Image (cartoon, rainbow, N blue to C red):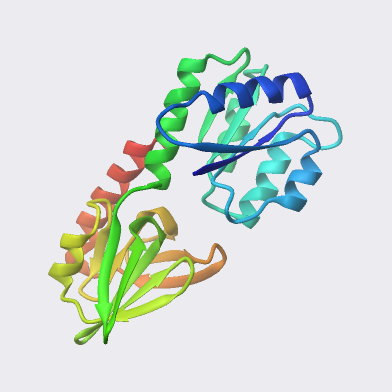
Amino acid sequence: MLKVAICDDSDRDASQLEHYLLSYDKFPLETKLYTNPQKLLNQLTPDIHCVFLDINMPGINGIDVAQKIRKFNPFIPIIFVTSYRDYMEQVFEVQTFDYIVKPIEPQKLMKVLDRILRFLDIGQALFTFSFGKHNYSVPSSDIVFFEKDKRSVFIYTKTGTYKSLLKTKEILEKLPNYFIQIHASYILNPKYIKDFDSKTVTILLNGTEEHLLPISRKFQFSFKEKYYSYLSERHF
């Protein structure tokens, strides 16, 4: 289920957008409407997958709302829906996922939803593994990174950490191909990258907890190549 928040001070516009979103037939959607942006900020929870925001709203600008959302969730796709084209440069400063000009074209909206699903990797592969007498299945999209320590591997996810006994080759064979190896000991999900330089990657666990992972010389080129390819495929 894709959970979508809609924030627009116009009831009519918010309802029309909701109508178009619920007509999407490739994946089930659940929507929550807000006409008050402060109420959205107060009620935004980690299980909301994306936010559609108007820009011109009384009391607070939609771009300011997006900046506050980014502090809560740096990765959530934010899509601006507005009658004005003048804000395009400003909205991309808050890493907007897309910018839709009213009146809404349903076909364009459907393509945006396709991209959101690809970006979030919802309903995709499960990563299965075992430890001791227990078997586990974790959505690949929820895995933040892997850390190898001799024969053991620690699997850091959005909800917790697991341990298993897997070789690096086995891990890579089980994962979607967008995962990136950056070191003999580390494989990461690019979805959770906050920043990087030539030697390290800053990755966010639980949305706020920063981990600094080393990039070995062997993987410097392939890391950048795969990461930029990942970004271009998702247009984010």
Q: Which residue lies at the image location 24% right of the left edge and 58% below the top edge?
A: 175
- Residue 160 image position (x, y, % from top left): 46, 74
- Residue 71 image position (x, y, % from top left): 64, 55
Residue 85 lies, with reference to residue 158, above or below; the image says above
Q: Which residue lies at the image location 48% right of the left edge and 37% below the top edge?
A: 28
Residue 3 lies, with reference to residue 201, above or below; the image says above
In the image, taking residue 90 as reference, residue 146 lies left or right, namely left
Q: Which residue lies at the image location 45% right of the left edge and 24% below the top edge?
A: 110
Asked if residue 54 shows in the view, the reply is yes
In the image, taking residue 162 as reference, residue 22 lies left or right, namely right
- Single out the residue that lies furthest toward the right: 59
- Residue 18 image position (x, y, % from top left): 63, 27
In the image, taking residue 141 as reference, residue 174 lies left or right, namely left
Asked if residue 200 shows in the view, the reply is no
In the image, taking residue 167 as reference, residue 73 lies left or right, namely right
Q: Quadrant of residue 57?
A: top right
Which one is in front, 235 or 175? 175
Residue 136 lies, with reference to residue 21, above or below; the image says below
Q: The C terminus appears in which quarter of the rendering?
A: top left
- Residue 14 image position (x, y, % from top left): 70, 25
Q: Which residue lies at the image location 55% right of the left edge and 27% below the top edge?
A: 21
